[in-house]
Each structure stands twice: as C-alpha cells, then as structure tokens.
Amino acid sequence: MIRYIERTKAYYRAQGFEHDYQWARNTHTPLSKPAKPLTSARITLVTTAVVEPGIPKPIRTAKSYRFSDAPAHFDTAEVSWDKVTTHTNDRESYFPLRALNARVAAGDIGSLAPRFHFIPTEYSQRHTRDQDAPLITQHCLEDAVDLAILIPL
C-alpha cells in the first residue's frame, strides 16, 4: 500500500516547505445544471498545460489566449506523472480543439468561445481561489461562455 498523503507531506518537507500541504475540502459543489442545451451553448477550455514555457513557473499567472493562438504543442515537461506509460505528444488528447470544432460544425455544440484559459499548477489554494479563478471567471463572462471544460494535467 502506498500512503500517498504521508509521502506528499514528506516530499514537500524535503522541498523546504514549513507547513504540510492542506488538501482542499469543499462542503458543496458549486456547479449547476446548464441553462441552455448543448446545441446552443458556447464552450471554452481551461487547462493547466503551459502555453508560454519561457515564463518561469514562480511568476506564471492565469491568462486567457485566443484559440487561434493555441500552440501546436503545450509544454508539459515540468508536470509530474508517469511519463513512461503516458505522454502528451498528441495535443488533441488533452486539448480537444479539433473535436470541439467538429462538434460545432455538426451542430452538437452551439459555438466555441474566442478564448481558452490557462491556470498554472499552484500549490496555494488561496491564490487559485482568490486570484486565478476570479480572473478566468471574468474572462468567461466577457466571452459569454456557457460551459467550461476543465482539463488539469
């Protein structure tokens, strides 16, 4: 048996963090039934895949990008997972832009928003909750987004 939480605590302590990672605890799920059918909904993507790898991790912030500016390959090298059995060489497997456009063309989805959104992997729940999420929410409202597909890597 792997004691994941204990291993995570030990890992962060070895990195020099003074306090143990506090796992998120949500007393309710802030989701709601879509207000309109998918066939008339505007969709966007929210990803943690790095769009601009030249920006150092410590200073990355949430940002929105035009879908037309999506890179051919996002940088996922610094994200931790089993890279022997899983990879991100196929962008469509974690950023399904072609599939979404095909669904729009088929009439299954109303439209694609003009922008997608990047949220950096962040160890501070407070920063994600108080800064990144409100910014992305604001941009989604500006783009009249009905549904966001969240794709954390």
Image (cartoon, helix red, strand yellow):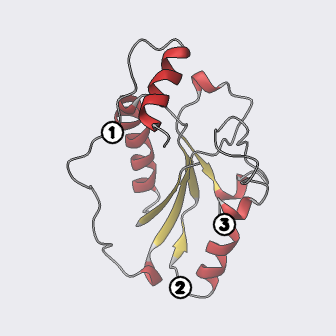
User: Above or below — where is 24 with respect to 46?
Assistant: above
Is residue 112 placed above or below 122 in the rendered structure? below
Q: Which residue type carries mark 3?
A: Leu
> Image quadrant of residue 125?
top left
Q: Residue 136: horizontal and vertical position, in percent?
A: 45, 46
Residue at screen point 73% across, 34% down: 53
The foreground one among 23 and 100 is 23
Frontmost of labels 2 and 1 is 1
SS at badge 1 = loop
Q: Position of residue 39 (x, y in %)?
A: 46, 84
- Alpha carbon distance from label 2 to label 1: 35 Å
Residue beneath the point at 65% across and 38% down: 79
Q: Are marks 2 and 1 in contact (CB under 8 Å)?
A: no
Name the residue: 29% across, 61% down.
31
Q: Which residue is mark 2?
A: 108
Query: In this rendering, which labeled residue sits more in front, label 1 or label 3?
Result: 1
Label 2, label 3: how far apart the Cα atoms are: 14 Å
Q: Report x, y in % for residue 22.
A: 35, 29
Amino acid type of disc 2?
Asp
Q: Callout 2: helix, strand or loop?
A: loop
Mark 1 vs mark 3, CA separation in Å: 30 Å
Work out whether residue 30 or residue 89 is closer to the camera in this orientation and state it.
Answer: 89
Which mark identifies residue 24?
A: 1
Which structural element holds mark 3? helix
Residue behind mark 3: 97
Give the total number of marks visible in the rendering. 3
**Residue 38, position as x, y percentages in the image:** 44, 80
Which mark sits nearer the N-terminus, 1 or 3? 1
Q: Is residue 96 above or below residue 12?
A: below
2 or 1: tag closer to the N-terminus: 1
